[in-house]
Image (cartoon, rainbow, N blue to C red):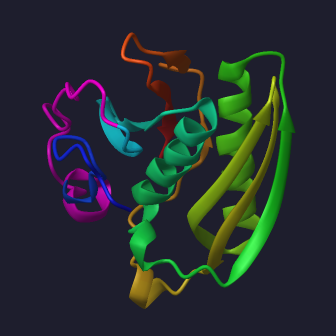
Amino acid sequence: MSNACPEWGNRLDQSPVSAMRRDWSGLVPEATAAGCDAMAWEHFPHGADIGVRGIGATRAEAFEQAALALSAVIADPGEVASDTSIEIRCQAPDDELLLADWLNALIYEMATRDMLFGRFAVALDDHTLVATAWGERVDRPRHRPAVEVKGATYTALSVAQRADGLWVAQCVVDV
């Protein structure tokens, strides 16, 4: 992924994949580059759990990036091949519940299929999500899964458009 905003970007160097034993305080700097057209994801600190945040020019892009942040809690999504595609559909009464349902659907698919996902395409129509997730079966020696994500929570759950026009989709996941 090309990233026009160097202070955003993918936070793999600051994720639990490479820093499981680090203190979470001060983990993610503020993203202040208004007007950047790059999608991004990041983790944010939350006690014993971890927050996932997706940032995009559209709600759909923010949902895609939140899914990448979720994947990065477990392993480096850049190391996950796109061998298998899974279609996921969710519907909810609002954007926040739709985000939680989307992330929980991904967690369910990863657990039941023993898969990791590294690429996503999301289409949103009001509060209906239709998405494709691409990934592969977990190869523990190669992927080195850091933690198991148990579920997306309603803690810090938010989907909102910022003043600069970018969308942010976030919540805390239980690890």
Residue 139, above or below 58: below
**Picture quarter with the N terminus:** bottom left
- The residues colored magenta run 14-36
Q: Is residue 5 magenta?
A: no
Looking at the picture, how far across and down is residue 21, in whole percent? 19, 54
Q: Main secondary structure of the magenta part?
A: loop
At 35% from the left edge and 36% from the top edge, which residue is drawn?
48
Q: Is residue 163 left or right of residue 106?
A: left
Looking at the picture, how far across and down is residue 86, in whole percent? 79, 67
At 42% from the left edge and 14% from the top edge, which residue is drawn?
162
Residue 72, above or below 102: below
Residue 86, above or below 131: below
Residue 54, above or below 116: above
Q: Is residue 111 left or right of residue 32?
A: right
At 28% from the left edge and 49% from the top edge, which residue is drawn?
9
Q: Is residue 13 left or right of residue 93?
A: left
Q: Is residue 145 visible?
A: no
